[in-house]
């Protein structure tokens, strides 16, 4: 079982993955927690590049997209191994981030064809203003206008690809309960 949390920066992905992992552990499931970019060489290069505040030019973005796809190929092996061992994989982002951030370009889909589709995608849907206010004090380069565009693309994709849309504007515990309900339903568990 491969579960992915998607959403803009500050939507609460890391927070909710932590809570979800603890809950699933308590229920007796073994978990592999992964995130993109990973800690592979490609992943580390991506992180370094993402720190560049002038990273908006087109060739820079294309290079990043290629690196993300490469980083993902390595990650897919780990995910497959964990699934074969019966673990639940919880992933902070997946190839859908590339699709959304690169606006659905065909070549992006092509270079990501080796990426497995998650069994469940939870879209952490949040007002960009709220996400930004939660990230105050951290280095952020994305403005409200950009985040609104990304949020809308996520919502369009959610429709096409059957994501579970979570209202991430709510308080931490409410969001966690909503996520638990979705996952319990999908896994046939009681809560
Ligand atoms: N439901 C919530 N209500 C209020 N604050 C929250 C909520 N969820 C998370 N936060 C806080 O908002 C901030 C951003 O959350 P988090 O780091 O989980 O987001 P993220 O989606 O992982 O962001 P990034 O993509 O930048 O890693 C954190 O300081 C976190 O404690
Ligand atoms: Mg995070």
Image (cartoon, rainbow, N blue to C red):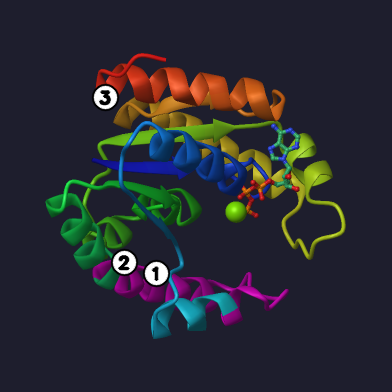
Bin the neighbour count of mark 2 within 10 Å (Cα to Cα): few under 14, some 14-19, many 20 and up.
many
Expressed as whole percent of the image width and height from the top left, the position of residue 173 reads: 65, 25
Pointers 1 and 2 in contact (CB under 8 A)? yes
Q: Say which of marks 3 and 2 sits in front.
A: 3
| Badge 3 element | helix
Q: Quadrant of the C terminus?
A: top left
Q: Is residue 7 visible?
A: no
Q: Which residue is mark 2?
A: 72
Q: Say left or right for 30 vs 132.
A: left
Q: Is residue 55 visible?
A: yes
Q: Which residue is mark 1?
A: 68
User: Residue, x 53% and y 25% (percent of image)?
Assistant: 166
User: Residue, x 50% and y 81% (percent of image)?
Assistant: 44
Q: CA distance from mark 1 to mark 3?
A: 30 Å
Disc with the residue nearer the chain's start (3 vs 2):
2
Q: Is residue 142 above or below residue 18?
A: below
Q: Which residues are magenta?
A: 48-73
Q: CA distance from mark 3 to mark 2?
A: 26 Å
Expressed as whole percent of the image width and height from the top left, the position of residue 115 reads: 23, 57
Q: Residue furthest right?
A: 137
Judging depth in this view, the residue of 90 and 134 nearest the camera is: 90
User: Residue, x 61% and y 73% (percent of image)?
Assistant: 50
Q: Which residue is mark 3?
A: 187
Q: Is residue 36 above or below residue 40?
A: above
């Amino acid at each position: 079982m491969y579960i992915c949390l998607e959403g803009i920066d500050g939507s609460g992905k890391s927070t909710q993955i932590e809570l979800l992992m603890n809950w699933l552990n308590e229920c007796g499931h073994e978990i592999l927690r992964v995130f993109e970019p990973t800690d592979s060489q490609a992943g580390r290069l991506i992180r370094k590049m993402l720190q560049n505040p002038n990273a908006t030019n087109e060739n820079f973005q294309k290079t990043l997209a290629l690196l993300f796809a490469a980083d993902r190929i390595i990650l897919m092996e780990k995910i497959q191994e964990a699934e074969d061992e019966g673990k639940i994989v919880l992933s902070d982002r997946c190839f859908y981030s590339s699709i959304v951030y690169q606006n659905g370009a065909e070549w992006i889909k092509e270079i990501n064809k080796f990426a497995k589709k998650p069994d469940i995608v939870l879209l952490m849907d949040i007002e960009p203003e709220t996400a930004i206010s939660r990230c105050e004090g951290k280095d952020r380069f994305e403005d409200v206008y950009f985040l609104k565009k990304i949020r809308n693309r996520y919502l369009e994709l959610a429709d096409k690809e059957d994501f579970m849309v979570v209202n991430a504007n709510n308080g931490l515990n409410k969001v966690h309960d909503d996520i638990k309900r979705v996952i319990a339903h999908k896994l046939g568990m009681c809560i």
